Image (cartoon, rainbow, N blue to C red):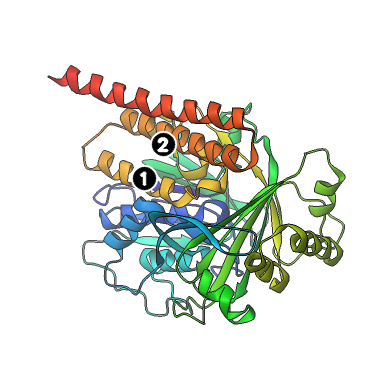
Amino acid sequence: MPLFCYPARDNVLNEPYTAKRPGGSIAGLLHGIMLKRLGHSVRILERSLSSTRANHAAGMGTGAKGHDFMSNYDPSAPPHAFHCPGYQTLDGQSGVKRTLNAPLWLTSWDVIYYRLRALFDGLSSPIFPTPPEAREDDGAVSFELASHVTDVTVEDDFAVVHYDDLKQPGTGGTRRAHLVIDASGAYSVMRQRLMPTLTHPYAGFVAWRGTVPESAVPAATRNLFETRFNIFPMKDGYIVGYAVPGEGGEMEPGQRLLNYVWYQLMPEDSPKLKRAMTDVSGHTHRNTLPFGMMKPEVWAEQVAHAQSVLTPAFFDLVKATQKPFISTIRDSYAPKASFYGGRLLLVGEAVALHRPNSGMAMNQAAIHCLLLRDVLQGKMTIQQWETAVLEVGRRFGLLSVLIVDWFLGSRFGFVRSLMRFAFHLVWQRLMTFRKRLARL
């Protein structure tokens, strides 16, 4: 599981630790870089056996705060994302029905992961072969593989991280630190241990995903996806698509990938869902059917369905996809983010797993990270941090549900979600105003 631990640089503790795993790797690395730049010693305990990640074929947006983080902590490096001026909705013939100007920064999971690794511990990769030199005032860091964290306890005012060594079964150890940051996602071991009643309910729909090289689709389709985030709604779902960096991080037109996410309603008890989530070996997955493991006949049926419901441009992407994958959509929200008197903190999706329709995962992680920086710099308390982190989770969660209800729900459901979201925003502004009055 992904955990972060650190003590201050001038502390007598010689073995501070930070840890995380792929499910929470972006959130974990953001926090690790921030702590390193503040001069803290940081170690990441990583369950994976290798630093190399298989191509996730997954596009993503950085969000405003994620982009700000990358710009501030990686200012001189090549671009990490494409600037997108906004959205456009397509009609049934791939014509543009309407546009909305709202700047976005679009990239891929692989590009962000390897850039953050280069910044954190100087990992060289094909995507980012020349990592920046460490600064003189940076804290010491390490990224330790094959380390599975099993528990966090408190002893003598320190957090104690218990872990197993996956390369040598039956071995492991403990490490002490002033602070442990759990960035392991919604299925974190510690999250489940501390809040065992939390669940991850299915939201009633799935996401079919894939990427194709720009060169694999007609010129008209390439041009349509050149700069805009495209959306096409249909009866049982909607699909979005946009350009992302190539497999080697290429940003130049013609060398990029076109990424899409097709959200489709699918009842939890439907045979179609079980069939879609069963891989080529016969194993049925609960959350994600891995990249390249989909049964050919299942994908053939989906392509046939795509031809009947999708606009031609999106159908070009779907039929050119070689290795699709599918995920069930779930959400889950923790009522707490700070434990053991602030010695253990949950961040990222370990706090709030919202539906991906709003594209806020990295944005949320960056907000958590920058708020914790304020704590370390004495600008807020850990209690104020927790309040802010939980509010961000609720806000992004309500926004995600609002988007889902607009495209997949009823008119009544959308109005209800809109009212909940608006009430939350108004309530937060009132609370902010009240706090300002109290300080007068």
Describe the element under mark 2 as helix, strand or loop. helix
Residue 193 falls left or right of residue 323: left
Dot 1 and dot 2 residues touching (CB under 8 Å): yes
Quarter of the image for residue 136 reads bottom left
- Tally the marks: 2
List x then y, in percent, for residue 440: 12, 19
State the residue position of label 1. 367
List x then y, in percent, for residue 108: 51, 65
Residue at horizontal 28 percent and vertical 31 percent from the top:
381
Residue 235 falls left or right of residue 136: right
> Toward the viewer: 417 or 163?
417
Mark-to-mark CA distance, 1 and 2: 8 Å
Q: Is residue 155 visible?
A: no
List x then y, in percent, for residue 311: 66, 62
List x then y, in percent, for residue 99: 45, 56
Describe the element under mark 1 as helix, strand or loop. helix
Q: Residue furthest left?
A: 440
State the residue position of label 2. 392
Mark closer to the chain start, 1 or 2: 1
Amino acid found under the numbered disc labelled 2? Val
Residue at horizontal 86 percent and vertical 61 percent from the top:
281
Residue at horizontal 69 percent and vertical 64 percent from the top:
291
In the depicted structure, whether residue 174 falls above or below residue 130:
above
> Toward the viewer: 206 or 371?
206
> Toward the viewer: 194 or 86?
86
Residue 111 falls left or right of residue 401: left
* Numbered mark located on residue 394 in the image: none
In the depicted structure, whether residue 261 falls above or below residue 411:
below
Q: Residues within 10 Å of mark 2 (few under 14, many from 20)?
A: some
Amino acid found under the numbered disc labelled 1? Ile
Quarter of the image for residue 155 reads top left
Q: Is residue 416 visible?
A: yes
